Image: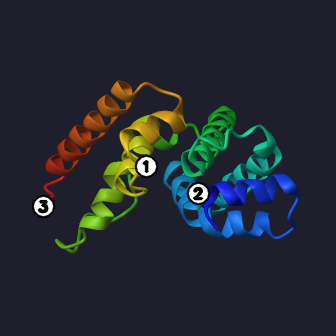
């Protein structure tokens, strides 16, 4: 079943359609949420909230739009809301997470580029990390990302350029060579 048919099934109240939606998109929605939240349980919560919101809002969805960017927009908004709530919570210690030293050992395996990329991505601004993830991991086009984030295509290109530049600079400063 293609996406327009799935949307029509959801609107018609087909009891199997929500399961099909989740099965089809849970990987990319969870991946986005995990990348933004940085914690598995928080990402699971955000992804679940995103699907609930999508199912509640499916009647207002424009079937001429692609479904995937719409779902990712909802997921990104859920993550931003959760991150804002997290930022308002008082910390247990006197220092913030950014002030604490990284407890992980330095790069032990020179071939652990994936781990180094994870550390570099975690240091990016959330908008840059989100655009980088949507472009490089979810393979969305500039236009799809712009639609999902309700931003102009030029802004998306700028954020992606800055994300790449900051990631390259961070990796270089830490002595990681690709």
The residue to which callout 3 is attached is: 178
Residue 76 image point, x, y percent:
58, 43
> Which of disc 3 and disc 1 is earlier in sequence?
1
Question: Left of 47 or right of it: where is 148?
Answer: left
Compared to 83, does 3 lie above or below?
below
Local crowd size for mark 1, using a 10 Å CA cut-off: few (<14), some (14–19), many (≥20): many
Secondary structure of the residue carrying tag 3 is loop
Question: Left of 160 or right of it: where is 168?
Answer: left
Residue 11 image point, x, y percent:
82, 52
Secondary structure of the residue carrying tag 2 is helix
Compared to 11, does 97 lie above or below?
above
The residue to which callout 1 is attached is: 134
The residue to which callout 2 is attached is: 29
- Mark 2 vs mark 3: in front: 2
Secondary structure of the residue carrying tag 1 is helix
Q: CA distance from mark 2 to mark 1?
A: 10 Å
């Amino acid at each position: 079943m293609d996406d327009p048919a799935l949307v029509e099934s959801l609107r018609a109240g087909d009891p199997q359609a929500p399961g099909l939606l989740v099965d089809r998109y849970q990987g990319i929605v969870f991946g986005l949420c995990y990348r933004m939240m940085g914690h598995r349980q928080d990402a699971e919560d955000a992804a679940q909230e995103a699907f609930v919101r999508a199912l509640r809002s499916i009647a207002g969805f424009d079937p001429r739009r692609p479904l995937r960017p719409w779902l990712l927009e909802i997921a990104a908004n859920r993550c931003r809301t959760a991150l804002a709530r997290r930022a308002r919570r008082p910390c247990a210690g006197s220092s913030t997470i950014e002030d604490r030293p990284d407890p992980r050992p330095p790069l032990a395996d020179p071939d652990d580029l994936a781990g180094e990329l994870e550390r570099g991505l975690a240091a990016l601004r959330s908008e840059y990390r989100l655009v980088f993830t949507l472009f490089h991991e979810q393979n969305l086009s500039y236009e799809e990302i712009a639609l999902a984030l309700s931003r102009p295509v030029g802004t998306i290109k700028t954020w992606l350029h800055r994300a790449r530049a900051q990631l390259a600079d961070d990796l270089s400063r830490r002595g990681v060579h690709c």
